[in-house]
Amino acid sequence: MTATPATGHPASPPYPTLFSPVTVGPVRLENRVIMGSMHLGLEDRRRDAPKLAAFYAERARGGVGLIITGGFAPNRTGRLTPMAGTMRSAADVVAHRTVTHAVHAAGGRIALQLLHAGRYSYHPWSAAPERSTSPITPFTARRMSRRAVGRTVADFVRAAGLARRAGYDGVEVMGSEGYLINQFLSPRTNRRTDAWGGTPSKRRRFATEIVRRIRAAEGPDFLIVFRMSMADLVPDGQSLTETLELARELEEAGADLLNTGIGWHEARVPTIVTSVPRAAFTAFTRRVREAVTIPVAASNRINMPLTAEQVLASGQADLVTMARPFLADPDWVAKAAAGTPGRINTCIACNQACLDHTFQNRPASCLVNPRAGRETDPAFPPLPDRSLLPVAPRSRRKDTAPRRIAVVGAGPAGLAAATQAAARGLDVDLFEAGGSIGGQFRLARQIPGKEEFAETLRYFRQRIDETGVCLHLGRRATVPGLLDGGYDRILLATGVVPRTIELPGIDRPNVHAYPDVVSGRVRCGPRVAIIGAGGIGHDVAGLLTEPDPAAPQSPRSWHSQWGVDPDFTDRGGLTAADPGAPARRVHLIQRKTTRLGAGLGKTTGWVHRSALRARGVEGITGAGYVRIDDDGLHLDVDGARRVLEVDDIVVCAGQDSQRDLYDPLVAAGADVVLVGGADVAAELDAKRAIEQATRLAARL
């Protein structure tokens, strides 16, 4: 690939299929990238419309072909929560014009997602094809009468018309993820025997009638996207035959684009967490693409340009849909088009600041980009070099005297603080005692299923070069050295050290701190006890029981582990799971009497717990630690003595802040700030650390 001397941009597109134009119904898109729907927590109050507009406009300026909003209900019954956003009135139209005007002014296109939650609604007025309660809400949905079904179809049609009045280029009808339309489609939740159920064709009628009537009302010049479930991943879900027939009928009804949805929210198969291989579900999308002539978009765990290009070039889809990658980096498309994928701040699918926030009724943001969703917040101003693609390494200017900053520790907090400060023109020295950057992220990427964490370190290495941070690897900062450096401020991001526990026998050679095990410095025997069942304990248990931790997990092996059948032999795309033989026998122990992993992420904790159960990990709660000797680990459990005959014991009992430099520097009068784990040691909270560092750098 060659580059033009004047701009440094590639002379030809580095991803030719991804950046080839495509016509979708009445709309011509300059690239094949769709920003998929995600709920930000800004949709539910009209006064937040300017914030929502700023969020979408920033992504439009970044070059995404089509934006699809978070879901808005077509009526009150369909709202996700009692006060969730709707598109049902003139007042809604006025508020949404703020959003559409901003996106169009930035050169983008945007469609409104229409979502009726059905039995997933978190309020007592919910309604569904049948009276039922979903596993994810405490409310029982009432059965919709035939008249109510007809009214709901009309509500979708009216909402689409209002969306057009609000300036949207089209709508996406949400027919996936187990929401109302998906509930009508599946025999799992639709056992009606009237005109809206009883046979596959009648179960499809609700979906196709909505699309047909929107097309009749709005004509051919209005974009209609249908997000359909390519695989329900729940028992008694749709069959392959039913899925393909639905696709054909939606095309006939007037849909312009079929967007991929995978799995219901109640499915026991993970679909978007970091352990899911990239592009793991495109086999399902390919089957649908082969059945229709309209474009089909692939989705789920597509986060980098090469993956997207491979999906498109291999004929698995016509477009790719990505949601969270645009939280991580609003300029994803522009950086890919410029041939600089190394500059992309990659979504690592951790869910900690996005989906976990959503399910806690908090505004969504991003662990690696805390500015996401806060574009109007002065605490998160845009970086001055935003429009420079690519950015040349910043040289230190001799004619100015920028403030000098020392950052000690190159973990997530230190990396964020150093690069953000340098991008704003400060002179930054970054000291790291180890031989490479990353801190606890360097360990995290060793855990099977967390390989994506390496992408964040790649991004920060790039940012160090771009912003001119002076990186000192293998150099332990000292108090005299920092005081003699002439720094205006010193940021201590020295991180954490593993917490030690008082226990007879804790100093035996078969007792290890978790960093030694994760890094590979220590290899455990076939029987292991883990003291501490927080996030680190679960990660270590996963590492030690992984059948082949050195082998990268392919989609095929992952499908087998979780019981996903890409050939769609049975309903729902499910088959018998085969987790493989665990490499070791592991006991995971905690003092607390609560269930193991109770403090893990809302949307990821169940994945960890399920994987460890499948590998036979024994969880022990309410344990008192007695001693370690030749016989093993002695415990008191429920008032009885128990001895675990194990070869090795790994201590994952938490962390303590490492702040040896702080008091001497303060005593010497230095301007010192603690950031990240050095400030608060709490389960390696990278989300808090990076956000804190970003806020701090903006104030320097």
Image (cartoon, grey):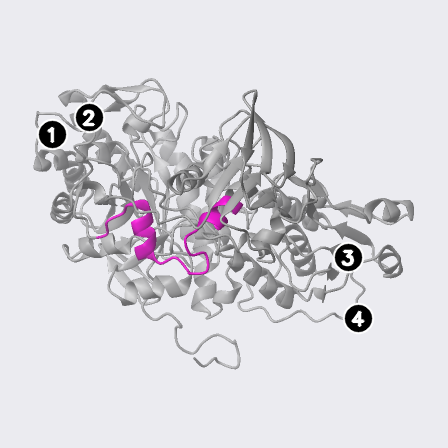
The kind of residue on which mark 2 rests is Pro
- Residue 697's spot in the image, x, y percent? 69, 51
Residues at marks 4 and 1 touching, judged by CB atoms closer than 8 Å = no
The kind of residue on which mark 3 rests is Ile
| Range drawn in magenta | 540-566
> In the rendered view of the protein, which quadrant contains the N terminus?
bottom left
Q: Is residue 527 visible?
A: yes
Please say whether residue 87 is one of the residues in the magenta stretch.
no
Q: Is residue 26 visible?
A: no
- Residue 399's disc is 4
Q: Between marks 2 and 4, how big is the CA–CA gap?
A: 71 Å
The kind of residue on which mark 4 rests is Asp
Residues at marks 2 and 1 touching, judged by CB atoms closer than 8 Å = yes
Above or below — where is 132 with respect to 74?
A: above
- Residue 355's spot in the image, x, y percent? 45, 39
Q: Which residue is mark 1?
A: 197
Callout 1: SS: loop
* First of labels 2, 3 by sequence position: 2
